[in-house]
Image (tube, helix red, strand yellow):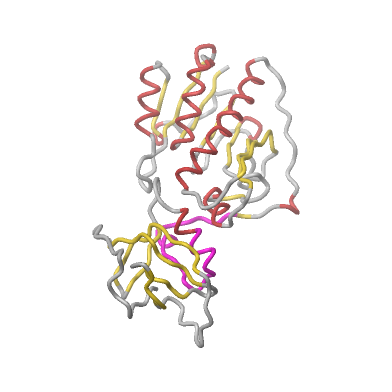
């Protein structure tokens, strides 16, 4: 049996590490295709490359391998790109959500922004429309907020490893992989994110804004805003008890408490406890008062 693994990021690395430690790769012919992601602080491409080299595993960069015809099954773990030329029942995708919820892009981040109490991973077959394939298996974990996205990724990696192990064990003994169609009426879609989405929308409610601030960070960027037209990085915040305001001037600093600015949101208030300038200068304790965040 010849298998191809398209791997990206920390999830891809730890799945490959588990495959190596299980010795599965010694009994089967596997090839690894390595993806890169410049939008994160560490995309684990070097670690994946080293793991392949140290264990004599064939490897390619994403641009080097486009033909999958010779492979029995093709896996996509942490992968962000369309894989062409593979039959749906030969392509096995690992998706960052409990499908059919959060089909699409950045499902883990979007689910955490919504403070979902249960977050998980789905192994599914490929399909013509993204993330609509039949579900092979799922794993989930409970989440307590606040939590950084980096910590959440660490917590969800065992779900990936467990699912990969389950699928490979079935393939190793020639067992049929049973999959169930998704219930379309339960589906929702997760929208792609870009650099603009790091900036806060102060018209949102305070609970959402505080959760977003406390979620973002390594391996991605931290939350951002403009303070009197200067870009600032906001690392931590907490919901502040709301006060009666005659006019709700969203984004303005209402008071400064313990050196921390309390900002008016669309609903509620938040207190910023960690903030730096774009160049890295500490801005807490806060030394201004007549300040507007946008």
Vertical placement of residue 293 versus 102, above or below: below
Number of marks in the image?
0
Up-down relation of residue 57 to residue 268 (above or below) = above
Query: Which residue sits furthest top?
Result: 27
Q: Quadrant of the N terminus?
A: top right
Q: Point out the residue furthest to the bottom here.
A: 246
- Viewer-proximal residue among 169 and 154: 154
15 left or right of 123 in image: left
> Depth check: 130 or 168 in front?
168
Q: Position of residue 257 (x, y in %)?
A: 38, 70
Where 243 sits versus 25, above or below? below
Q: Nearer the viewer, residue 212 or 288?
A: 288
Give the extent of the magenta segment. Answer: 190-211
The C terminus sits in image quarter: bottom left
Q: Quadrant of residue 173?
A: top right
Residue 114's place in the image compared with 218, above or below, is below
- Residue 209 percent coordinates (x, y): 49, 64
Say whether residue 183 is left or right of residue 86. right
Residue at figure coordinates x 51%, y 52% from the top left: 146
Q: Position of residue 136 (x, y in %)?
A: 68, 33
């Amino acid at each position: 049996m010849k298998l191809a693994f398209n791997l990206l990021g920390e999830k891809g690395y730890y799945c490959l590490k588990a495959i190596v430690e299980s010795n599965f790769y010694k009994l089967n012919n596997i090839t690894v295709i390595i993806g890169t992601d410049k939008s994160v602080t560490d995309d684990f491409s070097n670690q994946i490359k080293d793991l392949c080299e140290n264990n004599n595993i064939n490897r390619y960069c994403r641009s080097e391998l486009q033909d999958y015809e010779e492979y029995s099954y093709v896996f996509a773990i942490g992968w962000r790109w369309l894989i062409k030329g593979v039959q749906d029942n030969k392509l096995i995708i690992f998706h960052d959500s409990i499908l059919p919820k959060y089909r699409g892009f950045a499902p883990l981040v979007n689910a955490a922004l919504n403070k979902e109490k249960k977050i998980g991973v789905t192994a599914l077959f490929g399909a013509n429309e993204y993330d609509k394939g039949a579900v092979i298996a799922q794993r989930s974990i409970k989440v307590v907020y606040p939590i950084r996205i980096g910590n959440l990724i660490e917590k969800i990696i065992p779900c990936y490893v467990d699912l990969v192990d389950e699928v490979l064990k079935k393939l190793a003994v020639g067992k049929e992989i049973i999959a169930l169609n998704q219930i379309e009426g339960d589906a929702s879609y997760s929208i792609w994110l870009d650099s603009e989405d790091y900036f806060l929308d102060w018209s949102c409610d305070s609970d959402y804004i505080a959760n977003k601030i406390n979620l973002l960070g390594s391996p991605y960027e931290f939350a951002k805003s403009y303070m009197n037209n200067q870009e600032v990085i906001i690392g931590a915040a907490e919901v502040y008890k709301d006060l009666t305001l005659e006019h709700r001037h969203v984004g303005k600093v209402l008071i400064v408490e313990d050196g921390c600015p309390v900002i008016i949101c669309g609903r509620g208030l938040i207190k910023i406890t960690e903030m730096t300038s774009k160049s890295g200068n500490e801005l807490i304790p806060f030394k201004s008062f007549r300040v507007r965040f946008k």
